[in-house]
Image (cartoon, helix red, strand yellow):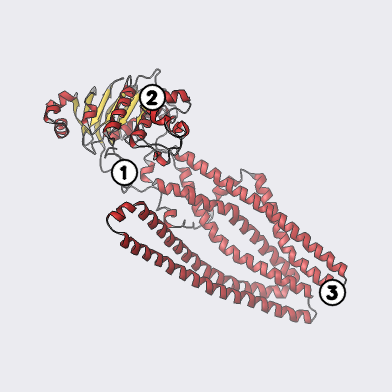
Amino acid sequence: MDADTPQPDAPPARRGFFRRSAAIEGEAKPARTLGPLKMIFREAANYPGRVAMALVALIVTAAATLAIPNGFKLIIDRGFAQGDPGDVARWFQYLLMIVGVLAIGTALRFYFVSWLGERVVADIRLKVQNNLLRLAPGFYEENSPKEIASRMTADTALIEQVVGTTISTALRNALMAVGGTAYLFWLAPQLTVGLVIGIPVVILPIMFFGRRIRNVSRSSQDRIADVGAMVAEVLAAMKIVQAFNQERREGERFAVAVERTFATAKRRILLRAVMTATIIFVVFGAITLVMWRGAIAVTSGEISGGTIAAFVITGILVAGAFGALTEVYGELLRGAGAASRLEELLEEKPAIAPPARPLALPEPPRGSLSFRGVSFRYPTRLETPALKEFTLEIEPGETVALVGPSGAGKSTVFQLAERFYDPQAGTIRLDGIPLTSADPAEVRKRIALVPQDGVLFSANARDNLRYGAWDASDEDIWEAARAANAERFLRELPEGLDTYLGESGTRLSGGQQQRLAIARALLRDAPILLLDEATSALDAESERLVQQALDRLMAQRTTLVIAHRLATVRAADRIVVMDEGRIVEQGTHAQLAEAGGLYSRLAALQFAPSEAA
């Protein structure tokens, strides 16, 4: 790829909407409000039947949970007090019925809520991906694709947890806290007043330690991630590590990372131990005090033994519900933060979009391409012009080679021809129609690209080939493979066209990948062909096979070629020499070699003196 192509690691001139990826940092930061959760509720509202069933199951389970203490009250007051085994059995049967309702309701609640969580996440992922596919390549230069991918995984996982667990837990605990408190006031108003006063005493230690443990746990996760990243980095570069005898140093570096992880884990363990002791003392101390006060009331005949039993059980449920609500709120804020980041992706508008009334490209296609007074700066490098007043007319069927030093603007010409960007000045026309007036999809249908490295997907050979024409038959695919000198090695693959090629086609050699890319372009059957250093990194035999395939591909097509190796473009109809975004020379190889300009100097460096002319 030409050096004028913007590099993904270059610092952007203006920031995109992303901060550093939450997944890379270890955990998404929570939002300040729950407002962004509206997006989740909108998606869930598309399934009103499931939402209704989940709510009914939620209410039933909350009511059944609160009915269990009343069951114990009835057993003690009406069963044991009467001394009749039949009465005892009857009230235990009542309690079993409540437990049965609770079990069925919990199962239904889990099913419907989990279904909603998975469905909402699936819908959000689909919408985000569909919008990402519409965005121009410039968006991915200002915003890291790795960070976007992390949002599609880490943030959607948070949302699935919020919909499938957190919201349900919050509603259930809210119902139990309110309903349980009302039931406590009905049972024993005086004891309830004391309990309400004591609830903050129980909750505050949970909040205090919980927040600190969460922060330490986050740090612990980061340290574990550091260890994992170090292992992956060293194992991937093991040949370099051993070649430079750095095994000992890498072992010491890993030991430091492991000890850092252990030190963080010790802090977390200590905090959890102290929190456990504190909570046990506070909770059971509060229960003991309530039971003490209740025992006095029972002795004096103010309340029954069943009432105090129901009161203690309900009090535990209510205190647990309030404690859970404090934790759930933090999870909801984290989910809101994830939702806001995904909503940013959904709301991003494509910089390159079809006009309201696109002009139709002429039929049949001619294959002419025109650049007139084009000036362009990449959004990430506004201070440096990539093209300056660039004018070039390419006739149908003509082969034009773009040559020049790195950074001259050659790849930028390709990017603009495909309308991945729009120039700041000038016009680009395809068959006489300005690109900005046409539908970008129609423009790209008339162009086939063979990139410098044969970009392949993690799929089988058939799907990689028919990426150029998805409706191509196997007969068409084999014909293109034959023309691209790829048929022989494709037939030798274990499963032929159904053979999985590995991630990015790693099961193939560089020359094989390139020939597959040429076959893909052949299937495209477009009138304009863009060749970006298609033979730059190949051995002599692979280059010969690829060049033969390219000669067949270029026949009867308008071809624009980028080349640093001038031997590959000597036969071009016209060679355009570029430097610093401008055209400095044009002509045939022989004409330019004799002119004594930039091309002549480049040719002198690459060819022997007898060949330069």
Image quadrant of residue 517?
top left
Placement of 354 over or under 263, stated as above or below: above
Give how far across and how far down residue 450 sits, in percent: 34, 31
What is the C-alpha distance between the residues marked 2 and 1?
A: 35 Å
Q: Is residue 489 left or right of residue 543?
A: right
Instruction: Give the residue displayed 40% in from the left and 67% down from the top.
Output: 259
Circle nearer the viewer, 3 or 2: 2
Which amino acid type is shown beneath numbered disc 3?
Ala
Q: Residue at x 60, y 63 (%)?
A: 325
106 is higher (above) or lower (below) than 383: below
3D distance between C-alphas at marks 3 and 2 = 93 Å
Q: Secondary structure at mark 2?
A: helix
Q: Which mark is residue 482?
A: 2
Q: Amino acid at mark 1?
A: Gln
Quadrant of the drawing holding the C terminus: top left
Percent position (x, y) of residue 454?
36, 35
Q: Amino acid at mark 2?
A: Arg
Asked whether, in this view, residue 236 is left or right of residue 196, the answer is left
Q: Residue at x 39, y 17 (%)?
A: 364
